[in-house]
Amino acid sequence: MARKKAKSTPGPYILRVQLLRERVTTPDRYPFNLPAVRNLDTLAFHPKVTFFVGENGAGKSTLLEALAVLYDLNPEGGSRNFHFATRASHSALDGCLRLAKTFGTPGDSYFLRAESYFNVATEIERLDRERDPRVYTPPLIDSYGRQSLHEQSHGESFFALFKNRFGGNGLYLMDEPEAALSPRRQIEFLAVLHDFCKRGSQFVIATHSPIIMAYPDALLYVFGADGVRAVPYTETEHYRLTRGFLSNPAQVLSELMADGPAGEGGA
C-alpha cells in the first residue's frame, strides 16, 4: 500500500542556522577559514525571502549548498528525489551546522544551482529513459513543462522550472538564478517570486543581481571580510555601483579608460 503523503502547510519552513564551533576541527581550512563562516554564529531566515549577496568567493554558495544538504537535497541541485553526483565537491560545512525548522510541512523543496543545472537536465532525461513503463508514473519532464530542458535556451529552461516545477507551500534554495536571465526576465522573475510567496513558499537566494535583490519583502545578508551582516537594499554595493553607473555611464567609462600607468604587456 502506498504511503499517504503528508498534507503540506504554508511556510516558513526554516527559521535559522547555527554554527556548532565545537565540531569545527580544521578552522584554518576551507570552508571554515572563510570570514562568513569563521564569524558565523546564528543566521535567521526571513519567512518569505532571504538573500545572500557579496563578492565571488565570499561563501554565499558554500552556505547555501550546506543548507541544501541539511534539508536532504542533492548538493548538485534538484529535489530530494535526485541522487546523482557528477563530482563530489561539496564541503564539510553541513556537518558543523544546526538547522532550526518549523513544524510546517512543505509540499515541495528544490535546490536550483545555476552552474550544475545542465547536469540536472541530463539526469531528468536519464531517469525518464530508464522509467519502467509498467509502473504508472508520469515522466519527470512532465513536471518541467513536457519539453526537454536541453532543447530550450538556458533562460527558457529556468522559466520552465519556475512556472511548472515550483508551486505553493514550497522551500526553494536558489544559487544565482539570474545567470541565465536577461534583465527583462529578471524583472519577470520578481513577479513569479512574489506569486509563490503569496502561496506560502519560502526562498533563500544567493545572487549578484541588483534587480532580483530589490524584492521588498525580504532579508538581505551581505557576505564580506567582516563576516555576514544584514543591510538595507540601498546600502549594498551592488545597488550603489549599478545606480552610479547608470546615472552617468559616460563619466564612469571615461574614468575607467583614462590614460594611466601602463600595465605589463607586449607586442
Image (cartoon, rainbow, N blue to C red):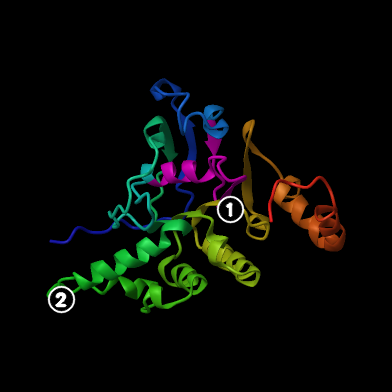
Mark positioned earlier in the residue sequence (1 or 2) = 2
- Frontmost residue, 242 versus 191: 242
Residue located at (39% from left, 73% from top): 150
Three-letter code for the amino acid on which mark 1 is drawn: Thr
Name the foreground residue: 121 vs 193. 121
Task: Give the magenta range.
Answer: 42-68
Residue 46, magenta (yes or no): yes
* 61 displayed left or right of 128: right
Q: Where is mark 1, residue-wise?
A: 207
Residue type at numbered disc 2:
Pro
Residue that badge 2 annotates: 133
Q: Secondary structure at mark 1?
A: loop
Q: Depth-wise, is mark 1 or mark 2 nearer the camera?
A: 1
- Give yes or no for residue 51 being in the magenta stretch: yes
**In terms of image quadrants, where is residue 192?**
bottom right
Residue at the extreme front of the image, as rendered: 267
| Quadrant that contains the N terminus | bottom left
State the image coordinates of residue 68 (x, y, percent, origin top left): 40, 47
Q: Is residue 131 left or right of residue 14?
A: left
Q: Answer above or below: position of 99 versus 123.
A: above
- Nearer to the camera, 162 or 267: 267
Give percent across and percent down for residue 42: 53, 31
Q: Are marks 1 and 2 in contact (CB under 8 Å)?
A: no
**246 versus 48 height, above or below:** below
Disc 1 and disc 2: Cα gap in Å? 40 Å
Residue, x 41% and y 20% (percent of image)? Answer: 22
